[in-house]
Amino acid sequence: MIKETLIVSDRGQITIPKSIREKYGIKPKQPVIIEEKNGEIVIKPVVTIPKNKLKTLARNLDEEIIKEILESNQLSPEEEKEIINSWKR
């Protein structure tokens, strides 16, 4: 387990230490999810797939797999609806 002490900037920003970014494969400009869970702040990397490739991939997936992808990405209901609607086009 890696434990670091970070300083929050005036703008509320922190820098994720290099050792943690490398361990979890977090690249520059990659989105992350931050959530409050059981009194702790949790930051998780998000796996992204380019929209043009996602449409092609989605056409080959069944409903069960699509649900698993959406749940694992922790999307908001609005984001989920937008993706599902774009797959149906």
Image (cartoon, rainbow, N blue to C red):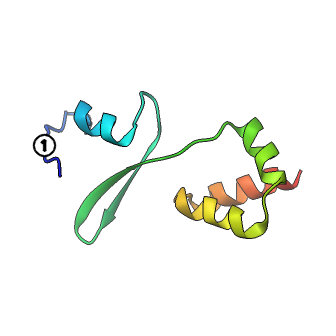
In the displayed structure, does residue 71 sit left or right of residue 62?
left
- Residue 21 image position (x, y, % from top left): 32, 36
Residue at image x 56%, y 60%? Answer: 76
Work out whether residue 17 can be spotted. no
Q: Is residue 42 above or below residue 28?
A: below
Tag 1: amino acid: Glu
At x 47%, y 40%, the residue is 31
Residue 5 appears in the figure:
yes
* Badge 1: residue crowd in 10 Å (few <14, some 14–19, many ≥20): few
- Going by the image, does 21 lie left or right of 50? left
Q: Residue furthest top?
A: 28
The quadrant where residue 88 appears: bottom right
Q: Tag 1's secondary structure?
A: loop
Relative to 3, 40 lies left or right: right
Q: Is residue 4 above or below residue 22?
A: below
Picture layout, residue 89 above or below residue 51: below
Front residue (pair 40, 61): 61
In-front residue for pair 23/6: 23
Where residue 57 appears, as percent x and y from the top left, is 77, 47
Question: Which quadrant holds residue 25?
Answer: top left
Q: Which residue is pictured at 71% across the width and 60% down the height?
A: 81
Image spot of residue 38 (x, y percent): 26, 72
Q: Is residue 33 left or right of residue 62?
A: left
For this orientation, the residue located farthest to the right is 89
Q: Nearer the viewer, residue 82 or 23?
A: 23
Q: Count every numbered label the image shows and give the total.
A: 1
* Residue at (84% x, 52% y) in the render: 59
Mark 1 — residue? Answer: 4
Residue 67 at x, y = what percent? 67, 66
